Image (spheres, rainbow, N blue to C red):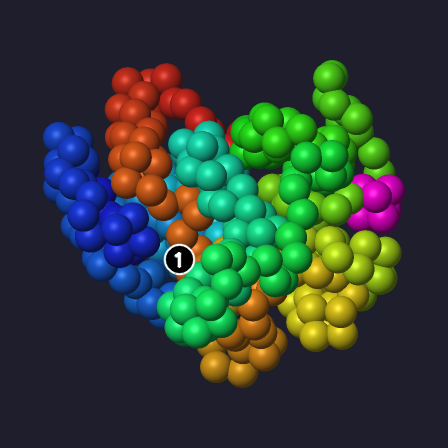
């Protein structure tokens, strides 16, 4: 049994991957460039992958391949239709990062809402000392209590964010394909118009790709805080930049990008250093506890498959 891990660096260098060795021969690659993937999966029975695109050209000669384990909940890097055609099972790792992503989401919102970076700069720059006042209250900030928090996508992460937002005494609006009991579910336009805070937690698919563009940002409140921890391609990144630089919205937080890492010339480079912008390097999912749960789920997926009772299969 040949098990190939294509990009273990995405799981962090501190994670113990030795648990996979009980299933067979493990070949580990720190990173795999797309042009290297075809050769590296050629003799694989099982592939463990995070970011490398598992498409027809990569998989067509991997005649022994029976299972692809995605080390994430989203699996938009895998050609599911081709895997079905070939009988290759694809297993994801659902819900492992819900608490972690919710924590980072709310941290971004709180930091942006309270202008925390500006206040930290006030102290570290020496301005607080030189002005001689016991406190500094500029820029003005407001409590989250009583604000409307719109949540786009209401899986386990969206629900976790909603519970925290409710603890702040926020009104919750939800946009999802099917209504959920106990929450006010509205269409996207209504959510965008009425929300003071908007956080995005939906999967990337044909319905959500580019769902927020110039039209949608024009609908939002001028002081709205918008945080994307879903996928970079769910919004038009050029429209995001325009909205921030032209004051159409108050602030953004973003942990995901259409191309990762951010390349030179990416639209968001125009936002670097702005105090109403929080950009992080796709880390919201990655607490040690979350990554451990993720890999343990991968091991459970392999174990279940080998025992003839596969779980977490998204390619049915």
Over which residues does the magenta segment extend?
189-194
Q: Tell me the element at label 1.
A: loop
Whether residue 253 is visible to the viewer of this picture, yes or no, is no
How many marks the image carries: the answer is 1
Q: Nearer the viewer, residue 145 or 298?
A: 145
The residue positioned 34% from the left and 67% from the top of the image is: 33
Residue 262: x percent and y percent? 47, 71
Q: Quadrant of residue 40?
A: bottom left
Residue 179: x percent and y percent? 77, 24
Q: Main secondary structure of the magenta part?
A: helix
Q: Nearer the viewer, residue 220 or 36?
A: 220
On the picture, is 280 further left or further right than 28? right
On the picture, is 78 further left or further right than 40? right
Q: Quadrant of residue 243?
A: bottom right
Q: Nearer the viewer, residue 119 or 13?
A: 119
Residue 316: x percent and y percent? 54, 30
Q: Would you place residue 203 above or below residue 258 in this image?
A: above
Is 192 contained in the magenta span? yes
Q: Quadrant of residue 148?
A: top right
Q: Which residue is mark 1?
A: 52
Whether residue 10 is visible to the viewer of this picture, yes or no, is yes
Q: Residues within 10 Å of mark 1 (few under 14, many from 20)?
A: some
Q: Would you place residue 34 above or below residue 304 in this image?
A: below
The residue positioned 20% from the left and 43% from the top of the image is: 15
Is 23 contained in the magenta span? no
Q: Quadrant of the N terminus?
A: top left
The residue positioned 44% from the left and 61% from the top of the image is: 120
The residue positioned 42% from the left and 44% from the top of the image is: 285
Residue 58: x percent and y percent? 40, 59
Residue farthest bottom in this picture? 265
């Amino acid at each position: 049994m040949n098990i190939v891990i294509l990009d273990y660096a995405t799981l962090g260098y501190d994670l113990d991957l030795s648990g996979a060795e009980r299933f067979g021969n493990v070949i580990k690659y720190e990173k795999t460039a797309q042009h290297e993937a075809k050769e590296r999966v050629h003799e694989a029975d099982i592939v463990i992958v995070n970011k490398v695109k598992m498409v027809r050209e990569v998989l067509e000669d991997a005649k022994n391949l029976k299972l692809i384990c995605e080390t994430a909940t989203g699996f938009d890097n895998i050609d599911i239709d081709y895997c079905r055609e070939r009988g290759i099972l694809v297993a994801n790792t659902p819900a492992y990062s819900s608490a972690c992503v919710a924590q980072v989401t709310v941290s971004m919102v709180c930091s942006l809402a309270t202008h925390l970076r500006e206040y930290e700069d006030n102290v570290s720059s020496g301005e607080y000392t030189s002005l001689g006042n016991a406190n500094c209250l500029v820029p003005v900030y407001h409590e989250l209590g009583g604000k409307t928090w719109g949540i786009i996508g209401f899986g386990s992460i969206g629900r976790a964010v909603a519970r925290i937002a409710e603890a702040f005494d926020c009104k919750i609006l939800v946009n999802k394909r099917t209504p959920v009991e106990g929450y006010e579910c509205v269409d996207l336009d209504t959510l965008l118009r009425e929300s003071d805070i908007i956080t995005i937690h939906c999967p990337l698919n044909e319905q959500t790709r580019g769902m927020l563009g110039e039209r949608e940002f024009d609908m939002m409140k001028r002081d709205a805080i918008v945080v994307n921890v879903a996928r970079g391609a769910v919004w038009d990144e050029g429209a995001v930049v325009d909205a921030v630089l032209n004051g159409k919205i108050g602030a953004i937080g973003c942990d995901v990008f259409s191309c990762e890492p951010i390349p030179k010339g990416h639209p968001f480079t125009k936002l670097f250093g702005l105090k109403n912008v929080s950009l992080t390097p796709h880390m919201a999912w990655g607490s040690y506890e979350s990554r451990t749960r993720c890999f343990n789920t991968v091991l459970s997926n392999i174990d279940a498959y080998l025992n003839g009772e596969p779980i977490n299969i998204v390619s049915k």
